[in-house]
Image (cartoon, rainbow, N blue to C red):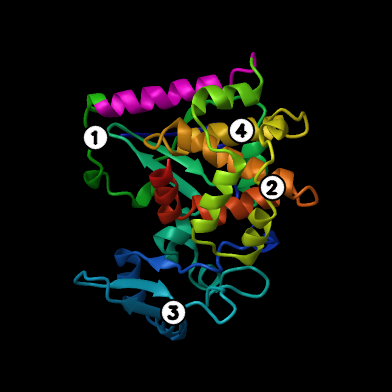
Amino acid sequence: MRAIAPSYYPMFRCIAGACRHTCCANWEVDIDPETYDKYMNMSGAFAERIRSSIVVEDDGSSTGEAHFVLRPDGRCPMLRDDGLCDLILACGEKALCRVCDEHPRFFNYRSDVIECGIGLSCEAAIPLILGWDKGFEMVDVPLPGGADLDLDDVIEEEPDELEIEVYEARDNAIRAASDRSAALSERVRMLGGPLWDSGRRLEVMKKLESLSQEWVSIYSRIDAAADPFTVLDDPQYSLQFENMLVYFLFRYPWEGARLACELLLMVADCVIANPSVDLFDIVREFSSNVEYSDCNIDDIQSFL
């Protein structure tokens, strides 16, 4: 088994306390069973603090689902006011639960390879992904989990015909999205087929779950009659939107190019509607509220 990732992936670094929009707030931090057992068997005063910050909810399984109880302000109980993590400072990074250790990374598990990526919900990842000017290329990277990965649990097998077809279609779509012989707006129309207008996308966004009022304020300003294709070809944004399209295609191989194009146009709708808001802030809010919710992605798919 090997792991591959976009060539910018190894350059990502968490900016920790310098981050203006911490990923340690506003959503429950789930604790995987292995880490939960580790916390339960730790000793000392800090271990007691960890355990007092955890709740286990009945999810129908034999063990339940453990997560940290957020503070009244929505922040993780381990998050300090300076943006650093008490858990890391006291116990080291190996004490983190899986979701904290991996975020904002995501993985596409194929039969014979693991694809690794970083997500647009992270303010340190956004300029790296959207500002990348060296073209989209996959490189070999260490397997996720590193030395802690149990290779006996990683089963490599030959991909079936459907998997081969899906990833070939995805890779062809990425090449088409990167072909600058045509304007980006033309590439989106070609890849997306029959696309919604801005009014329909606004209706869909209103039906999705939202985590922040800031995001609601951003999409609520959308003009249903606007033409999002104009901003795609604006030299100020064309590289960022091209990289965004490639990112969506890479991240959602099974959902297809139509979803990637609709997600891109949702962002474009928001950019046109919010000229005074920085593109990176719009992208971060969109990714955090829409893209990082499996339920929201499933709902968008159901509307297509």
Percent x, y of residue 111: 27, 34
Residues marked 1 and 2 touching at CB (< 8 Å): no
User: Residue 51: horizontal and vertical position, in percent?
Assistant: 39, 81
Q: Nearer the viewer, residue 297 or 157?
A: 297
Task: Count neighbours of disc 3 (C-alpha within 10 A) and say few if under 14, some if 14 to 19, many if 20 or more.
Answer: some
Quarter of the image with the C terminus in it:
top left
Residue at 70 percent of width and 60 percent of height: 18
Residue range highlighted in magenta = 162-181
Answer with left or right where residue 8 lies relative to residue 1.
right
| Residue nearest the observer in this picture, 88 or 98 | 98
What's under tag 2, amino acid-wise? Asp
Task: Give, as a three-letter code, the residue at label 1.
Answer: Glu
Chain-order first, disc 4 or disc 3 = 3
Residue tagged 4: 243
- Residue at mark 1 to residue at mark 4: CA–CA distance: 30 Å
Q: Quadrant of residue 15?
A: bottom right
Q: Amino acid at mark 4?
A: Asn
C-alpha distance separating marks 1 and 2: 49 Å
Query: Which residue does the numbered mark 1 point to in the structure image?
Result: 156
Of pointers 1 and 3, the one earlier in the residue sequence: 3
Q: Residues within 10 Å of mark 1 (few under 14, many from 20)?
A: few
- Above-or-below relation of 67 to 109: below
**Label 3, on which residue?**
50
Q: Say whether residue 165 is magenta.
A: yes
